[in-house]
Amino acid sequence: MNEVVVENRGNVRWIKLNRPQVMNAITSEMLSSLNEELKKADEDKDTRVIVLTGEGKGFCSGLDLKQAAAGEGIGGSDLANAGARHYSTREICTVTLQRIDTPVIAALNGPAAGYGLDLALGCDIRIMSERAKLMPGFAKMGVIPESGGTWYLPRLLGWAKACEIAMLGENLSASEAESCGLVNKAVAEQDFESTVNGWAEKIAANAPLAIQEMKRLFRHGLTQDFESHSHHVLMSVMNLFKSEDFKIGVKSFATKVEPKFIGK
């Protein structure tokens, strides 16, 4: 059974973690496959939005603790082999999420724990089912948020709130995660997939070159001063003015006809 499965829905590519019998606990094979699928989706010009989710009732339960207890998998003997290779920046999925320009929605259909939480934080937008929960229990396991959490949490929440969530290690409900800003929207279970589809399709219908450039500039802006960043923004705008999509957008505004962008 493939540990990562892909489904194309028009210009939206759903990438699903596929170990539902263990709430999509990670293996080195899963992480390698996920990394490759993210890169493929980013290289595919027909894919304008990626949705990352889990099969079954969980998003990702993190490290497979049964494997680790048996001395296997990323937490066991595999750590010195494939698991260790994962922790190079070339292979790590959350680094790939940060590098790619295609927007990624985390569809949190169920619990996100450990690495699963870090994976969700690496996505650009997070939509969470009310039956899901975030489980930042790193301190209770004697580890740290090893794949992006220490970078994302202070930026998303501020220093004090990041310390509260990481150091207490208590589970967060969908409503709690929404209220503190960790997720964009908490949704009733029966409305979850339609909401994710709706957001993904709206983004995919917008000008893809502009969406990709927004993500690129958001990323660069995190490490630039305002004047340097403004220079890069101006250069990007001048390039976008030359695009066919800009002409389509201007015509749509003038004629009040819904635009159909082509990504050129």
Image: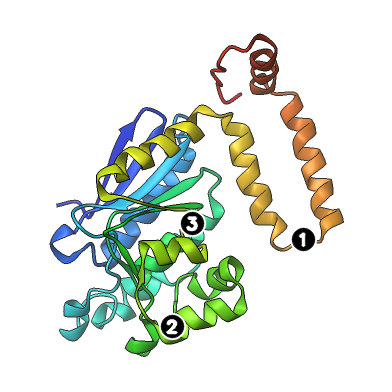
Seen in the image, is 188 located left or right of residue 145? Answer: left
Find residue 264 and name its label. none
Q: Position of residue 160 (x, y in %)?
A: 59, 81
Find residue 96 and name its label. 3
Which of pointers 2 and 3 lies earlier in the amino acid sequence?
3
- The residue shown at (39%, 67%) is 117
Q: Position of residue 66 (x, y in %)?
A: 16, 79
Q: What amino acid type should be assigned to the residue bearing mark 1?
A: Gln
Q: In the picture shown, does residue 166 fall above or below 236?
A: below
Q: Position of residue 222 (x, y in %)?
A: 69, 61
Q: What amino acid type should be assigned to the residue bearing mark 3?
A: Thr
Give the foreground label among 2 and 3: 2
* Disc 2, SS: loop
Instruction: Residue 115: name its quadrant.
Output: bottom left
Residue with the mark numbered 1: 224
- The residue shown at (28%, 65%) is 111
Neighbours of disc 2 within 10 Å: few (<14), some (14-19), many (20+): some
